Amino acid sequence: MKIALLPGDGIGPEVVAAARRVLDALALPGLVLFEGDVGMAAYRRHGHPLPAETLEMARAADAVLFGAVGDPEGDNLPREHRPEAAILGLRAELGLFANLRPAAGWPGLEHLSPLRPELARGIDLLVVRELNGDVYFGAKGERTNAAGEREGWDSMSYCESEVRRIAHTAFAAAGKRRGRVTSVDKANVLETSRIWRETVVEVARDYPDIRLDHLYVDNAAMQMVRAPGQFDVILTGNLFGDILSDQASAVVGSIGLLPSASLGERTTGHGTFGLYEPIHGSAPDIAGHGKANPLAAILSLAMLLRHSLGREADAGRIERAVAKTLGDGVLGADLGGTASTEQIAAAVVSNL
Ligand code: ATP
Ligand code: MG
């Protein structure tokens, strides 16, 4: 089992080091760790945010644990040299097509949510977002229209095989959760959504135990605020998923707690190859102060063990240790507490 650690910029190295302490404490037999440069850290050392050796390291691993990329200095660089180009490059080069973002309210932390506590308490959902298609990757451009104005255009497309593989990911995930998939589209307006919906219905036949329903994206956004407890797995495309996954994080309210997985097609022998990262960014405003909350990175590690290494029991151990840490009131500044990155990591390790 090989894991590539890519800490990156800002608080990335701090939270990845914390996750590594948890990983070390599990003492998994036969585990080999590699560490690579990515983002602005890589640009400074190698002149590129995603050096070839980092990409090779990621390819050779069973899973990647990624911190964050982004740096105020990066904004002045040409687009292909900006630190953010590294994560886009990794997604494309590694064929990561499925983005999984769980969002759940933690007991005792309902006050972080902008929703009423009784609504916040009920949130336990997983957004499964398609990551390789849609309007982001279609033909686009700028032209001068008949009236002589500049006009931009982007084309949206989905083919059946793209929908099919992400639908399988969502149904399989629902089978391990509460057995419900809500597919989100705009089938009343978009051709892509009509193909999407028909293909999802077809895939659903392979999963007779999963309950499938459909929502238009506008209604889904409204339901996420009015009654988020109704959702188990939300299956959606790249654009709608971008928006809905951020909305799901916002209704939970704790950016420092939320992990993510981006899965590829390759199997590892124990699961699926994937890249795992906290949903938060490099947070340059707090970098180097030792006060970043490492729990999103630690929970990303749990997802890595579950999906790429087939170590469900270890993933569960980490998640229970995190729940105990929060329950004991070991809270970072982002959650209204005073615990440092180190203290939070140490508490998780001792709760393992
Ligand atoms: P990037 O451009 O890399 O996305 P950002 O600053 O735009 O960085 P985030 O890194 O997501 O966005 O941070 C948003 C806010 O949340 C910042 O004020 C940051 O300090 C805070 N924050 C983010 N992650 C954490 C964390 N793990 N612990 C504590 N605070 C955090
Ligand atoms: Mg940001």
Image (spheres, rainbow, N blue to C red):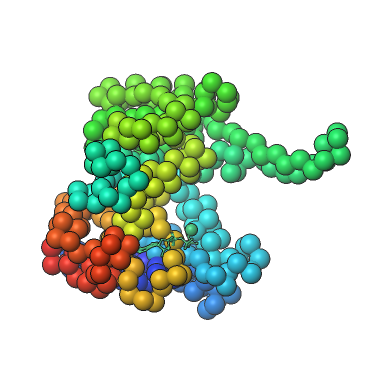
Closest to the observer, 230 or 133:
230
| Whether residue 45 is situated above or below residue 121 in the rendered picture | below
- Residue 86 visible to the viewer: yes
Closest to the observer, 222 or 320:
222
- The image position of residue 235, as x and y in percent, is 40, 34
| Whether residue 100 is situated above or below residue 26 in the rendered picture | above
Residue positioned 49% across, 53% down in the render: 91
Give the quarter of the figure containing the C terminus: bottom left
Q: In the picture provided, is 123 more to the left or to the right than 28?
A: right
Closest to the observer, 204 or 334:
334
- The image position of residue 183, as x and y in percent, is 41, 29
Residue positioned 38% across, 40% down in the render: 127
| Whether residue 203 is situated above or below residue 6 in the rendered picture | above
Closest to the observer, 253 or 30:
253
Q: In the picture provided, is 193 more to the left or to the right than 229?
A: right
Most extreme residue toward the bottom is 45
- The image position of residue 17, as x and y in percent, is 31, 71
- The image position of residue 142, as x and y in percent, is 76, 44
| Whether residue 72 is situated above or below residue 322 in the rendered picture | below
Q: Quadrant of residue 334?
A: bottom left
Residue positioned 28% across, 37% down in the render: 119
Q: How many marks?
A: 0
Q: In the picture provided, is 208 more to the left or to the right than 91?
A: left
Q: Quadrant of residue 191?
A: top right
- Residue 1 visible to the viewer: no
Residue positioned 33% across, 54% down in the render: 254
Give the quarter of the figure containing the N terminus: bottom left
